[in-house]
Image (spheres, rainbow, N blue to C red):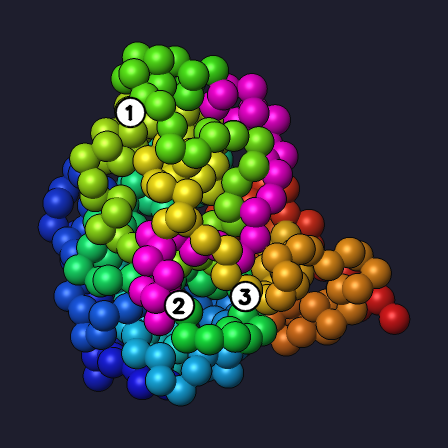
Amino acid sequence: PIVAVAAAVAVAAVAAAGTGAPPPVEPFAPNVIFALIKSSSSADYLSVLAERNACLLRALPADASYDQVLFHEGSLTDSALVAVQTAVPNARLVDISDAFGAPPPVAAHLAKSLLGYRHMCNFMSMLWHAVLRHYEYAMRVDDDVCVQHFQENPFDAMRERGLVYGYARETVELHDETMETLPPWLAQYTRAEGIEPLQRADVEKMFFSNLFISRPSWWSTANVQHFLTQVAASGNIYLHRWGDAPIQSVALRLYAPPSSVGWLSVPYLHVSTSNMILADGTEANEASKHEMYRHPLTRAYSRYVRALSNTNDTRVAMTPPAASLPPETPPE
């Protein structure tokens, strides 16, 4: 692929102290692929990052022009940064430590072990698009995702179809507390604002956010920013663990014309929750997941998380609470 990259480790310092918002990344290409990585340089985790990157290089067409940005929490040592850069040599590393600092006062009572996932949801709901706002299109591909293939250049497909958001999988929200608290909050919000949603604002269904493509500029429009500001002010990302996927999905259904949100055929593996997304947008059943369990990314991620679990490391909290690790020995 034609990948525009910085030659050395590029670490952007957080300038907006107290806001959690780093300065925008300056592009070398019109598009960017991004992820939030763990604060680890263990051999197993470096294998995870290297395999994710290998998947991308195999899957993307040769004419794809993009930067790659890896956000991190700011706690990686210099040697760890070099190790990550070696595992993913075409990446720029961006420090977002302010977004992983103290929680808002409404959540001050939460244990530290509960904050990591909530901080991630907050960043991936509220801040990623601001940091990447100088790009035309941004594609999120999480550290535990292996893209199997793209049928076409995904960035070109978004432009040709005039999309502001492209998703590979629509699924059901299974988090009970979100389903209990987000619908009434949303109903009150739409009434108070006098909003007539452009699409049915169905909280029960959401777009998987571990892989998507979007126009960062759309998230900076006035209506969307007002909605996100109200979500942040509610404190419910921290109080009720509202995830970035339902928040994004609601914003799109409120303010994006239906023709601007589209499905893309992108088969991929999401190993932390044992999801195998097929080319038709459905999910493989358990009996069909042998390939995923044998995949190098799955095995490396399993070793990494089990090692953390054995040491009670708080980085385990960055993994979705509903995650189900694949078996240590892949089924025959």
The tag on residue 157 is 2
Q: Position of residue 320 (x, y in %)?
A: 55, 45
Query: Image quarter for residue 131?
Result: bottom left
Q: Amino acid at mark 3?
A: Val
Q: Position of residue 187 (x, y in %)?
A: 43, 16
Viewer-side residue, 20 vs 158: 158
Residue drawn at point x = 33 percent, y = 27 percent:
231
Q: Amino acid at mark 1?
A: Gln
Please provide the residue range marked out in magenta.
155-183
CA gap between label 2 and label 3 equals 12 Å
Disc 1 crowd, CA 10 A, few/some/many (<14, 14-19, 20+): few
Viewer-side residue, 11 vs 137: 137
Secondary element at tag 1: helix
Residue drawn at point x = 58 percent, y = 73 percent:
148
The tag on residue 198 is none
Depth check, mark 2 against mark 1: the one in front is 2
Query: Image quarter for residue 12?
Result: bottom left
CA gap between label 3 and label 1 equals 33 Å
The tag on residue 266 is 3
Depth check, mark 3 against mark 1: the one in front is 3
Q: Earlier in the sequence, mark 3 or mark 1?
A: 1
